[in-house]
Amino acid sequence: MSTTNTEHYTTKDLSSEEGGLKHVDDSLSTEDHLQDIQRANSVNMSPELFEKLFLSPQNAIKGDLRKTFANPTPLAVLGLVMALTPFSCDVMGWRGAGGDGAASTGAYYFMGGLLMIIGSIGEWIMGNTYPFVLFGAYGGFWLSFAATLTPSLGAYGHYASSYSDANPSAGLDDPTFAASFGFYLLAMAVLSFIFAVGTLRLNICLMVVEWGLTICFGLLTATFWNLSQGNAAAAGKCLIAGGAFGFIASAGAWWILAAQILAAVQFPISLPVGDMSSVFPAARVKEDNLV
């Protein structure tokens, strides 16, 4: 190959009415030409935009997975809001609702559970550890909660001697069941607290979601433990308060979902989520410690 053919590259002159071809700047080296072409064909995403779209600090991954697959984060957030919002309204008793959210069992299975698990798998493929664990944990919670409310699975039926098809709710008000289920809710409160600490490096809206869920699960724990002790009045107050904090958390998740959808379609209006990455900078890891 001749030197002339190697060093001279042509590009389409978009400003020419004839659409003709012209030579690029001959003063640039071949390496500079290639770098210009690479920069032109790539879209740089700011850390703030990346964190808004993926709910995770920007990280380097092998390959072009983020250019190949769609962003799974909005799907998981959608699953969260479509399960958490009706649950919160139910336990607060709005418009006569009740039954510990049992009316939305289907939503817990196929919105909160299924969509969040799918989103979690997508985040795993993308290499985003925090949302992968976050969505997987809450997806598992909604599936397990729905299973607990499903009479045929007998989660609470084991605590009632009178359980039958004619009386499928027998056992729900059993003190032993309430005390036992409270420990699961307590574990979810601890898990949510760990997630909440992680949000201090992400954004304010996600902080609202996670701290709201931490308090919500804590109050739900108090609800079931008060029921196990026969303190129905205190349990009712804790249940309503837990629903209120769950509703606050769902409001933050709705805002995140709206911000992500608008960003996905490049809407001219960008909703802020309150970036926190500059408040708590990333820890510096020595190269010797990298594996």
Image: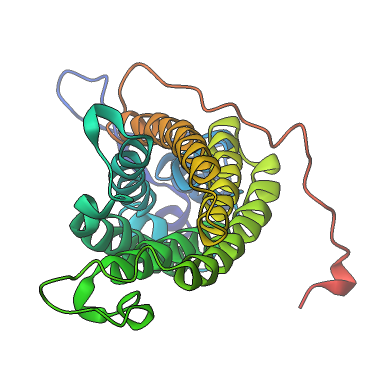
The answer to which of 227 and 270 lies nearer the viewer is: 227
Q: Is residue 1 among the parts visible in the rendering?
A: no
Q: How many numbered callouts?
A: 0
**Quarter of the image where the N terminus is located:** bottom left
Residue 247 image position (x, y, % from top left): 42, 34
Residue 174 image position (x, y, % from top left): 41, 68
**Relative height, residue 34 to residue 285 (above, below):** above
Residue 218 image position (x, y, % from top left): 60, 50
The answer to which of 226 and 136 lies nearer the viewer is: 226
**Quarter of the image where the C terminus is located:** bottom right
- Say whether residue 218 is left or right of residue 5: right
- Say whether residue 202 is left or right of residue 245: right
**Relative height, residue 123 to residue 36 (above, below):** below
Residue 229 image position (x, y, % from top left): 57, 59
The answer to which of 87 and 254 lies nearer the viewer is: 87
Question: What is the quadrant of residue 276 in the picture?
Answer: top right
